[in-house]
């Protein structure tokens, strides 16, 4: 999600830029320079016909997405294994099932979400009908990353489709196995007049961003997030940016080390650490560090065995570039646990670093790998200072037996999300919004939040065409009395519940 | 060289102390705002009269009362809005505490325009303060009387460690925008909106942009011309047309145009007398630049009503233009003045086509005795807001979000929407530090059985999400 080039820097060798088979091939040389023009125009024209508006159409798209997931479960698991050595368990739990749940939720609630929301009226609008209408924006662009290439592509897609938009999907070219399935198989399950997959690397994405979209949802690094937002400015396109940061994990002296170690380790090494909401570094006292280290070793051994490299439950690093980046980080501080790496497999052992300085590279960028540095602090206050001096992270974790300590950490910091005595399990709860703040992003989605994100909320008032005499009060010329009455009418609110 | 550095640092330091977090502090600020409005009512009426020749009536109704109502609403609901919002849980999180916490962003910048210089400064301010932010206010230098009151009088009513007014023109605003803010709220033109968003992108600052556009006003053949004329005229000429949500142009058939013109003349005479220039109820154009801009538009099409202007007063008569081409200047930019062009269409479909070929406006109006027609216009177009059979009354309802779409803006506010706009909604999950055995299911090495149980626990069905 963040860190240098986690989305793919210019020097990242990408595949030959092509369009997915769902897009028309252009023989016309004048459009060879812009491979997206026709596709985008086609989708806009489709949107203008209004075909995506009825609930039946949207439900059909969502059911198509559902069948895609069910029909191609093995194919997708294989692709995820190919891209990230993701175990079937991780693929199910963090990708396929999450997507399926989101589709099911949207299908179940579609009519309710689409309904006009009545709004309270005041004295002067008492006889009118006031409501908020949810409308699709039009043409939506979703740019997805490589670390959860199914989840972070399809969950936004659910929201965009449910909200009635036409969608252009730009999956990551770095997770090539999944990209292929999304480009070649997924479109067969959707109405291709309203949906397209476009492929390419940073250059093609730059070209794509020169076009007008009505909404852009981007998941990736803050660096590229800025580029996307700047491009969006040209057309005043609203954006949701799901970015990243270094997610602090405060571990209090008052805790059970093994419980904490289990929870932190699981969330840190899940997907070989390539998770935007993973705990990035630990803050704790030296005493707690001493208790934690053996507990972390114990957890790692329990999860991955004595030889983690041979465990089927540990993923691999996505590509050489990131592997080398992470390998360099192993030189920071001192290796307390793990530290092994194997370039031929892009394997990095579940690692814990200690004696780390704030100025070292491992504390300067989002780690996005199975390396967990521990920084020492003397007190909760020092930990909070450390955290608040830095950019607001996407996630923040606090472990303590004391609810007071957890609350203090919650109240005195800010972050996209917060977990007390737990990692990012909240990702499984669609009733919680997922989104960043500050450098970690803007906007949010999941569940109904996705639908709302991809909808324009249009304020509507339907007045009576008659009863004009009632309006006499508001027209000039004014008397003191009419002024008084109108002022009172404007000021009297009937809604206290908002 | 940087006049804002110290001020911004001071405000950030104040925010870091946590001073603005407690409800008590925020309520005090809001009550301060309330007293500001009450104590200085005459001063504000005079300033608005000086800047825009706004009548007391217009000032009361569209500036002071609206601002006061927003403060009152915020005070009444502050604690409710601030509360953590519990959310439905699934089996996997049944024993946890799951909620959304509303947090201030930090340092908020509000850039306000000149046309409703009190309303469009204070109503956002209410939301920003209620949400617990420190605020920098940049009122418009163009409405310089109100600017003076906001700069010199308003701060006395607020905690100045957490609030500042900064002054200046485009150059100073550009300098201001180079700094990092945690939220930027801008009301103004799309052109400057782009500049603000570009500056915000550098710091990944979220923005709300309340912009503008040409707000179409469709008038069906099936209507009572006088009723429609009254309503359209009032909303068009209010504040001498300088309203972002005013009906900008009419679309109707030639037959309806014929019925409308005398009705519009009748409404104008009723509202402003035979000599509108001497009516106390008609405002003036804000400055020379805009006056000259509008004067030039009087040359478009053919004047059917009004058309007079007086440079010494920056007066433009309530005007209706006909025989206007879509290519003429008056149809190329947001008018923002008391000039109402009428364009002819042959049918509802043609009107809708005309509308949908253009940028999405901030407001859209449809007048018809037939609710079917009104609903069709609503269903086949998009806009920030919509009103059937009336003008921008929807703005007076704090239960409706106010904001644009497409070129007319992004984000929304008013009422609770303001509070939500200026808050970060932080998803929180608090779990017990005990009961670790329950987690055994999720840890590797995995078994198919464990996975099955976990998947059931994850199922969204347990959430009563229809209530969301």
Image (cartoon, coloured by chain):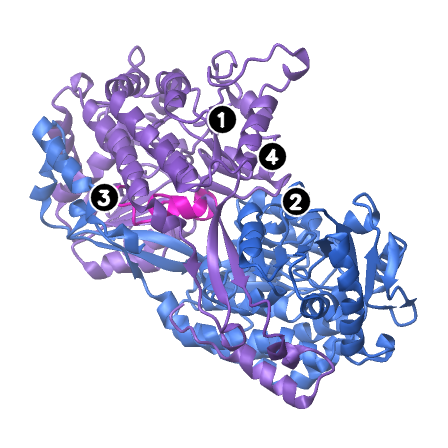
Chain colours: A purple, B blue
In the rendered image, residue B407, in percent from the top left (x then y), is placed at: 63, 46
B61 left or right of B436 in image: right
Chain for mark 2?
B
A308 left or right of B28 in image: left
Q: How crowded is the residue under tag 3: few (<14 C-alpha within 10 Å), some, or many (20+)? A: many
User: In this view of the protein, which residue sits in the foreground, B167 or A72?
Assistant: A72
Cα separation between marks 2 and 3: 39 Å
In the rendered image, residue A350, in percent from the top left (x then y), is placed at: 23, 27
Q: How crowded is the residue under tag 4: few (<14 C-alpha within 10 Å), some, or many (20+)? A: some
**Quadrant that contains the N terminus of chain A:** top left
Dot 1 corresponds to which residue?
Answer: A193
Dot 3 corresponds to which residue?
Answer: B460
A491 left or right of B263 in image: left
Which residue does the image show at 67% across and 70% down from the upper left? B227
User: Residue A294 magenta-drawn?
Assistant: no
Image: magenta residue range:
A428-453
Chain for mark 4?
A
In the rendered image, residue A372, in percent from the top left (x then y), is placed at: 28, 34
Dot 4 corresponds to which residue?
Answer: A212
Q: How crowded is the residue under tag 1: few (<14 C-alpha within 10 Å), some, or many (20+)? A: some
State whether residue A86 is above or below residue B342: above
Whether label 2 touches label 4, CB < 8 Å: no
- Depth check, mark 1 against mark 4: the one in front is 1
């Amino acid at each position: 999600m963040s860190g240098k080039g986690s989305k793919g820097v210019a020097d990242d060798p990408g595949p030959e830029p092509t369009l997915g088979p769902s897009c028309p091939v252009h023989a016309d040389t004048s459009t060879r320079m812009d491979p997206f023009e026709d596709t985008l125009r086609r989708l806009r024209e489709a949107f203008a016909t209004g075909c995506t508006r009825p609930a039946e159409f949207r439900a059909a798209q969502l059911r198509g997405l559902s069948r895609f997931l069910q029909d191609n479960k093995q194919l997708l698991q294989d692709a995820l294994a190919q891209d990230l050595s993701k175990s079937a368990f991780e693929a199910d739990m963090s990708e396929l099932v999450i997507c399926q749940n989101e589709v099911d939720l949207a299908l179940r609630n579609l009519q309710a979400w689409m309904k006009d929301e009545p709004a309270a009226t005041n004295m002067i609008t008492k006889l009118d009908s006031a409501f908020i209408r949810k409308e699709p924006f039009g043409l939506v662009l979703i740019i997805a990353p490589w670390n959860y290439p199914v989840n972070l592509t399809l969950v936004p897609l659910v929201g965009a489709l449910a909200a009635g938009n036409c969608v252009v999907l730009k999956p990551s070219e770095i997770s090539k196995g999944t990209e292929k399935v999304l480009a070649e198989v997924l479109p067969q399950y959707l109405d291709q007049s309203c949906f397209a997959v476009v492929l390419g690397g940073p250059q093609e994405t730059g070209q794509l961003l020169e076009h007008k979209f009505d909404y852009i949802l981007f998941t990736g690094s803050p660096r590229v997030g800025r580029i996307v937002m700047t491009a969006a400015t040209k057309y005043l396109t609203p954006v949701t940016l799901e970015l990243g940061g270094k997610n602090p994990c405060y571990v209090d002296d008052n805790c059970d080390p093994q419980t904490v170690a289990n929870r932190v380790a699981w969330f840190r090494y899940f997907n070989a650490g390539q998770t935007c909401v993973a705990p990035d570094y630990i803050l704790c006292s030296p005493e707690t560090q001493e208790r934690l280290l053996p507990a972390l070793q114990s957890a790692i051994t329990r999860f991955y065995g004595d030889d983690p490299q041979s465990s089927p439950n540990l993923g691999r690093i996505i590509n050489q570039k990131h592997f080398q980046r992470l390998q360099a980080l192993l030189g920071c501080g001192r290796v307390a646990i793990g530290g092994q790496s194997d370039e031929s497999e892009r394997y990095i052992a579940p690692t814990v670093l200690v004696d780390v300085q704030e100025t070292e590279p491992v504390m300067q960028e989002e780690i996005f790998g199975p390396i967990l540095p521990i920084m020492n602090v003397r007190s909760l206050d020092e930990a909070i200072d450390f955290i608040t001096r830095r950019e607001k992270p996407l996630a923040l974790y606090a472990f303590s037996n004391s609810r007071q300590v957890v609350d203090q950490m919650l109240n005195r910091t800010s972050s996209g999300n917060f977990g007390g005595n737990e990692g990012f399990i909240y990702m499984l709860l669609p009733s919680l919004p997922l989104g960043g703040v500050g450098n970690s992003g803007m906007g949010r989605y999941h569940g109904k939040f996705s639908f709302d994100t991809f909808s324009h909320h249009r304020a509507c008032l339907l007045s009576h065409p008659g009863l004009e005499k009632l309006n006499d009060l508001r027209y000039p010329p004014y008397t003191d009395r009419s002024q008084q009455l109108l002022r009172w009418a404007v000021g009297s609110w009937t809604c206290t519940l908002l």
